[in-house]
Image (cartoon, rainbow, N blue to C red):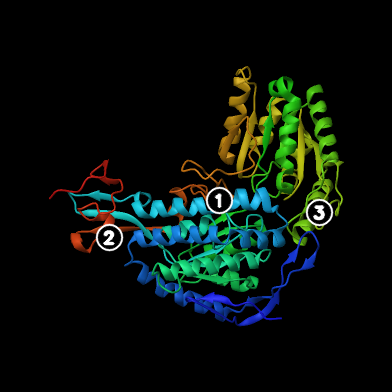
Amino acid sequence: MTIQPILINGKWCQADVCGQFQADNPKTKQPLEHLFPVSSWSDCELALNAATAAVAKLRDIPSSQIADFLRQYADGIEARADELVEAAHAETALPASPRLADGELPRTTGQLRQAADAASVGTWAMSTIDTAQGIRSVLAPIGPVCVFGPNNFPFAFGSISGGDFAAAIAAGNPVIAKANSSHPRTTQIFAEIAQDAAQQCGLPDGTVQLLYRLNHEDGERLVADPRVGATGYTGSRQAGLALKRAADAAGKPIYLELSSINPIVILAEALAERGDDLATEFTQSCLMGTGQFCTNPGLVVLPSGEMTEKFVDNIVAAFGQAAAGTLLSASVERSLNAAVTSLVDAGAELLVGGQVGAGEGYSFANSLLRVSGDAFLADAEALQQEAFGNVSLLVVASDLDQMTSIVGGLEGNLTGCIYSATENGDEASYRKVAAALRPRVGRLLNDKMPTGVAVSPAMNHGGPYPATGHPGFTAVGIPGSLRRFATLACFDNVRNSRLPLSLQDVNQLGGWRLVDGDWTVADIEQ
């Protein structure tokens, strides 16, 4: 069986192989047809050299040309949509429709086009001009960006198609993509489309490159290499923190999206008002996509009482009746089983589920666990670990004060939600809990489940550590996501013709600029 080529410096070539692997079909547990390489460090070396050469050339390419690439890439994705959906369905078992074809693929092309619009206008770069002192600054490309994609979103968060890729390219950087081993063929197709678009748009060789897998040591070496500008990573906490340690030691920016249990707090008044509806809403959110969303609600904090017991009975019944979906891979199945075992060992009571193999292929029974507020506070670290999948932990607190204490002791999360009475009858309770929850989440929701992330300029898909590596940045939402992959470039007394286009007297890009303290699109008159 032929080992598939890697994409280096504008060409598909054979890897310097130090191992090989195949993805498998999660529903059948059978290996798929393509064989992929584990690259040695020499492949990384080639990719880094090519990306470094591309950086210099990209500086002289107008942002409109980069925008053309992103739009043409989106068009190419749509032209091969059926092929991409078929490959991703085989590698992940995610439904071809509506999940992949009707949801994730349009989202992917949409964010590529949004990134193109941002690159065209350039407002994201926050051009700032002080005419009196002759000082001008702008966010400029940071250099080669490494992107490590996750297993659960092969399109919208993919290493060579997703938000990190789109943001890094729109900011003017070349990308070295490291595919997720769960869907290498899907990533390969994306790379073929991207490379064709890059060539047609005249981007330099090395703008888009693809490696499939590295050993752990080489992955850590890659993110710490002096030639790398920054890294974007979405995946497990263990692997992400290993990369972070390496990048931090070298002084290299790395933007991580790691584990998150996305706590939900349901106030007593909301339970009394619409507890049955909330049970249905929660069940649908938790089991959507077999729970394999980074914003899946993994922890629910409830007040003790009769309404909570009814709520618990309802969702236990619903979890038991719902079919267990297929998980993304054998490793997800193992990790989920280990997480549930750890939660039980830490004192949680298993209410329903807990068995491996309850569905088709790699699977785990829909599972709910329960623990008292006292027990949670006694071992909060062990009881708030992520169970990535169709599992959630219910924490029943003695009163509002204890609910607030539980929330106040949580680690950083991507999201947090408070369900409250519709007529603001519990305003004081809401404000008390919100004051504790807001600093611990990147996005605070009210009366809305967290599952899903809208591609909006106002979105924060980030959060306090350890949900991410830095609380000040978002992985979703343009233009904010572009600023992760930029460096602040300042020009003092530099002649007008030698400045970047966005800082010259004539506003050639037409975007908003901060000139002498005022935002304007006007030219500067001398």
Left-right relation of 524 to 64: left
* Residue 78 place in picture, x, y as percent: 54, 57
Between 118 and 514, the one lying in front of the other is 118
**Disc 3, SS:** loop
Say which residue appears at 48% left-offset and 74% top-offset: 48
* Residue 385 visible from this viewpoint: no
Vertical order, 377 against 85 (above or below): above
Dot 3 or dot 1: first in sequence order is: 1
Between 293 and 404, the one lying in front of the other is 293
Looking at the rendered structure, the kind of residue marked 3 is: Ser
* Residue 240 place in picture, x, y as percent: 62, 60
Q: Mark 1 points at which residue?
A: 106
Q: Name the residue under label 3.
A: 363
**What is the quadrant of residue 320 in the picture?**
top right
What is the C-alpha distance between the residues marked 1 and 2? 34 Å
What is the C-alpha distance between the residues marked 3 and 2? 53 Å
What is the C-alpha distance between the residues marked 3 and 1? 28 Å
Q: Name the residue under label 2.
A: 500
**Disc 1, SS:** helix
